[in-house]
Image (tube, grey):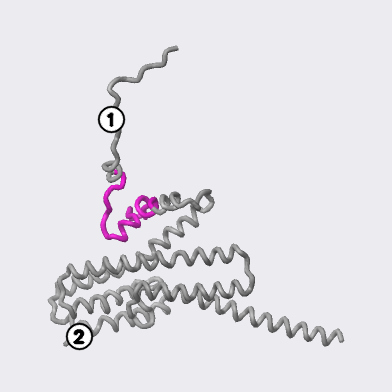
Amino acid sequence: MSLEQAAQTLEAASREHERLAQQREQIAQSIRGIGHAYHFVDPERGVRRNGQLIAADIQGHIEQVRAIAQHEGLSQSCLERIEKAERVVPKMQATIEFVSGYVSQQVAQLDLTQPASFAMHAKLIPSYYLDRVAQTRTVRDGTPLRELAARLRAPLFEPGGILRELNPEAHDQLHDEAKRLAAVFQRSSSNVEGRNGYLSLRNHQLRGLDLPRKRECFTTMHNFFLTRPDRTTAAERFFGQKPRSMFATILGAVNVPPAPLSPPRRAQG
């Protein structure tokens, strides 16, 4: 009887281990899916993705993780961390929409024809975005991205291509502008990640981070005052130019009280 009970216990433990292993794999796939979904360009197809689609994909993966966590009865702190990640999704969608509008304005200023403008948005900028993503991968993982980027660009400049008839100077200008705007798209997400990473590394041991005004102050300090070794701030890298002095702007908006007409009188003893 003891051997039979031991065999049943072992079989039940094996089934539980297999079930938990499947759930861990599902969570790992959801986390990888989030890393795949937040890209402005689909790394597999080279197609642009809008903020609404990106937010919907990320939200779907988060809901899968939450469902598993609730089913397994994980701790409240674990569920709170999932909710914390979920609060970033609307902000990311708003950021992507803002950056997309900025990129559209920049392309409109190039005064291109309608076909050339479409090629800029749908092919040229996404190709350079994929090149930037490939730089963050290993040589093996980055090779498919570089090949896809080359396939997106090549038809534009072949005989009969939309951008074939442009002169060499216009070619160079389009390439430079496409690289710059692709960097804007990438930095629109890395700017947020860098700020969160800095808070995690330096400031999470401080009290009061649950206060909205304090978090806004940390965000402002990171974006406008902290510099890299090349002496550039996050705001300067994001907008491509040095912003106005925040201190001078605040000083111009604040009414400084006038100096007193006479020195204050001492209290009579």
Q: State the extent of the magenta-drawn residues as a range.
A: 220-247
Q: Which residue is drawn at 41% across and 50% down?
A: 217
Q: Residue at x 53, y 67 (%)?
A: 82
Instruction: Inspect the image, locate mark 2, and give the three-letter code of the amino acid beneath it.
Output: Glu
Q: In this view, does 69 lie to the left or right of 8?
A: left
Decide which of 174, 215 is in the foreground and name it.
Answer: 215
**Mark in the foreground, 2 or 1:** 1
Question: If the image is split into quadrants, where does the C terminus sit?
Answer: top left
Decide which of 58, 183 is in the foreground and name it.
Answer: 58
Decide which of 145, 27 is in the foreground and name it.
Answer: 27
- Indicate whether residue 225 is drawn in magenta: yes
Instruction: Inspect the image, locate mark 1, and give the three-letter code of the amino acid beneath it.
Output: Pro
Query: Circle 1 sits in a helix, a strand or a loop, which is it?
Result: loop
* Residue identified by numbered label 1: 258
* Residue identified by numbered label 2: 158
Among the 4 quarters of the image, the one containing residue 257: top left
Residue 51 at least partly seen: yes
Image coordinates of residue 191 in percent, x first then y, are: 38, 61
